[in-house]
Image (cartoon, rainbow, N blue to C red):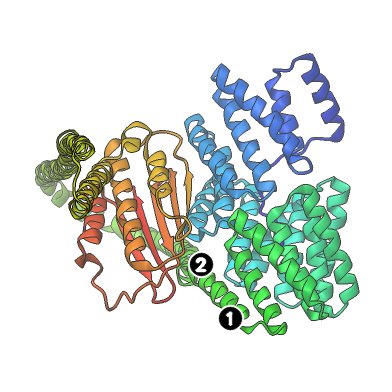
Amino acid sequence: MGLITLTSTSIFAQSRVDSLTKALKANEKDIKALLELCWEYRYHHPDSARIFGYQALKIAREKKENTFEVEALHNLAVTYEAQGDYKKSLAYNLDALKLRKQLNDEIKTANTLNNIGVAYDELGNFSLSLKYYNEAYRTYKKKKHIEGIAMVSSNLGILFKAHEDYKNVIKYYQEANSIYKKLNKARETAFTEANLGSVYYYTKQYDSCIYYSLKAQKAFKELNILQFLPLTYTNAGIGYAAKGDDQKALELLNTAVGLNQKYNNRKELAFTYIHLAKLMLKIKKLTEASENAKKAITIAEEIGASKQVMDAKETLALISQEQGKFKEAYALHLASTKIKDSLFQKDKTALISDYQVRYQTEKKEQQIRSLHQQNTIQQLEIKQRNLGLGIALGILLLGGGFAYLIINRRKLKAKADLQAEIIKQQDIASKAVLDAEERERRRIAGDLHDGVGQMLSAALMNLNGLFDKLKLQTDINLQAEQALALVNESYDEMRSISHQMMPNALIKSGLASAVKEFIGKLDQDKLKVTLETVGLNERLDEQTETVIYRVIQETVNNVVKHAEASKLDIQIIKDEEGISVTIEDNGKGFDKNKVDIKAGIGLSNIYSRVEFLKGTVDIDSTEGKGTLVAIHLP
């Protein structure tokens, strides 16, 4: 932590703000002035910046001016990123990306790709972050955009830092810092120096940590970049703490807390509270240490910062152990370990290795191409000597060769057309199966509601009227009441089954509303369920919505019946690549080696439904550590 991820930027002089404000007073719908003011205020007054940004976005959409609309979306995303709200930042960036591609501006598209990589990185989605960074890097390289290459290099350093590969981290930071110095970019140079201050703490080079942090701090003050000023105090503070200067560390960390609160830097605030708790533990002020750790947990859980939740709980476990609260310490340690396991360290290792292999492969391929060129020159010299001998034979073979190519091409085209038609018919058949199944569900649900439901309702009315008129003996009356209760229960069960088979919310309001209604009926005292949706601004096609709803419904029912969980997190994200659904519980889990996952009817249905739509299902579970179901639909 304590890092700054670089996004695409430009700088306006302070005098520029005054002229923009005057222009806005003269014309409150001056969209250029609104955009530039949003950009100018993005770091030191992000809340004010958003007011200008929202006004610009509204006017741009009213006028249907895509160029201004995409800049407003971009600027708003940066204001949320500045305050650590990466979920909202991601949503605005994804909307901006669609317009960037329509406008066909490759450099600005790369800027947005980079910003999306930042958001996914901060939200803990390592694979998607690396994907978008690499896509941005390829564009910058193609366009020879040196500043863009430096920006992505800095962000890749941050990505490798999450893996604790500090050697590569420092290499990328130093590379970016060198480029920014040559380009005379004071702001970006200061950012890379702040990042170097952070990474040197983890390599135990504490003097370098303090040096670069204070150097960046001075630059931020001179450049009036106040939003990121607190992290330089935090990094210098933890450097002094590591060197044993507890008083200086305490002074810097307390300053950092105040500044983070002032600028609403919630993720950095959680990070600072963690290190303040560690310092208080070190100097044996256990009550203050516990309070700071709990504050960190509360903030980190609110913003979904898994890494900070993990670190804060592990710190609180150490504090509880020191206080003699061993049972509480053990529970906190288990909770921290569970979060650590969920960060998919193995997957991150594989992806980093893949990135490095591709980088080395590219260099090898360049060498091979060079050797091929030399070899080609030699072969051309030989061919020139033998040209006279081969020309006659070439004329004889030329006609036959052309005939063969034409015939072969027709065969290949016919084969390709046949394969395409087979795939098309398979898709039609798959969709027909799903359509037939859903139509049958609706028919049965309708028959239950309109047929059996009305008969049960009439029976209830008749029974109630009959019991009111008859004066039955006590024992007969008891049996009659029991019969009436059974009819009532049957009626309720029939309505529940009818609604589960085809919920009205899915038909009328869409996927998000249907899932909210479904989980709203669960007992929140026994199972706390959270739902997060990103990118579902528009309705999906009916089949896709139905499949996702059925998968979530089946999975949640399995959790309720078997998992013995107290917490369930559901996430639905729609982006350029498709739709991703993750369902994670903290229940008892199971050993995948001992269970045939596809044997059960429910899970078998999940796999078959997703495969119909060319999607994938991954289930990860460990005994005692919960279960994660991840679905991706392209």
Q: Is residue 134 left or right of residue 623?
A: right
Q: How many marks?
A: 2
Residue 347 % position (x, y):
45, 68
Look at 31% across and 34% down and name the residue there: 507
Instruction: Determine whether the residue tagged by mark 2 lies in a helix, strand or loop.
Output: loop
The residue furthest top is: 26
Instruction: Determine whether the residue tagged by mark 1 lies in a helix, strand or loop.
Output: helix
Look at 59% across and 34% down and name the residue there: 73
Residue 207 visible in the snapshot: no
Q: Earlier in the sequence, mark 1 or mark 2?
A: 1
Q: Which residue type does callout 1 highlight?
A: Tyr
Q: Is residue 531 above or below residue 192?
A: above
Q: Which residue type does callout 2 highlight?
A: Leu
Residue bearing the label numbered 2: 343
Q: Which mark is residue 330?
A: 1
Other-residue count near label 1 (Cα within 10 Å), few / some / many at <14 / 14–19 / ≥20: some
Query: Which residue is at the front of the view, 196 or 583?
Result: 583
